[in-house]
Image (cartoon, rainbow, N blue to C red):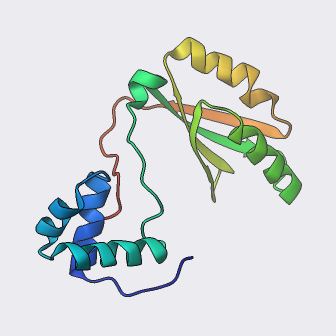
């Protein structure tokens, strides 16, 4: 259930601390935000119920698990019909190399972030997966040299 609630300075502190460490002990969180345990837990539950906290996850080491090479890929389709967009989105969701996909305005229809261990693996993804999706008209790839900023939370 998501609903709009007013969040105050303490709620923001709770969200910041949970974004940094979702496994923080409730007593430590209460100390950090300056409340006792019960009001802190009430606020966390309220933030969860309102949808500000959507879940808790472990931050995995992407480089060790899938690779260090991030490729930003702009994809243009030959048609922007609902059917063509849905077909592309279904195909791209099945590609484990794609870490994120955004429907865009501007020159390209989609922007993808693809993570692979090396150039050969990207080439294989490009030729065996991306170019075989029906309706793909143009692909432009850019290779990230290094991560400058990658926020884990909008409140960081």
Viewed as shown, does residue 104 lie left or right of 53?
Answer: right
Q: Kindly give the residue lying farthest to the top in the view shown.
A: 120
At x 33%, y 82%, the residue is 7
At x 72%, y 44%, the residue is 76
Give the total number of marks visible in the rendering. Answer: 0
Q: Give the percent coordinates (x, y) of residue 94.
A: 71, 36
**Does residue 65 appear anywhere in the picture?**
yes
User: Eyeballing the image, is 11 above or below 119?
Assistant: below
At x 84%, y 59%, the residue is 82
On the rendered image, what quadrant is the N terminus found in? bottom right
Q: Give the percent coordinates (x, y) of residue 125.
A: 66, 22
Q: Give the percent coordinates (x, y) of residue 126.
A: 68, 24
Relative depth, front residue between 99 and 79: 99
**Does residue 108 appear anywhere in the picture?**
no
Relative depth, front residue between 44 and 156: 44
Viewed as shown, does residue 32 lie left or right of 70?
Answer: left
Q: Kindly give the residue lying farthest to the front in the view shown.
A: 38
Viewed as shown, does residue 28 lie left or right of 125?
Answer: left
Q: Give the percent coordinates (x, y) of residue 144.
A: 42, 32
User: Eyeballing the image, is 91 above or below 118?
Assistant: below
Give residue 131's quadrant in the image.
top right
């Amino acid at each position: 259930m998501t609903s709009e609630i007013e969040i105050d300075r303490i709620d923001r502190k709770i969200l910041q601390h949970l974004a940094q460490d979702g496994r923080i002990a409730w007593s430590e969180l209460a100390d950090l935000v300056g409340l006792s345990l019960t009001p802190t837990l009430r606020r966390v539950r309220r933030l969860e119920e309102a949808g500000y906290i959507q879940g808790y996850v472990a931050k995995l080491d992407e480089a060790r698990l899938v690779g260090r090479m991030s490729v930003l890929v702009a994809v243009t389709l030959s048609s922007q019909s609902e059917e063509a967009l849905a077909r592309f989105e279904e195909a791209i969701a099945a590609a484990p190399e794609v870490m994120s996909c955004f429907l865009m305005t501007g020159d390209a229809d989609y922007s993808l972030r693809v993570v692979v261990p090396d150039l050969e693996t990207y080439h294989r993804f490009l030729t065996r997966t991306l170019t075989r999706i029906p309706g793909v008209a143009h692909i432009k790839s850019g290779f990230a040299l290094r991560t400058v900023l990658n926020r884990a939370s909008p409140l960081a």
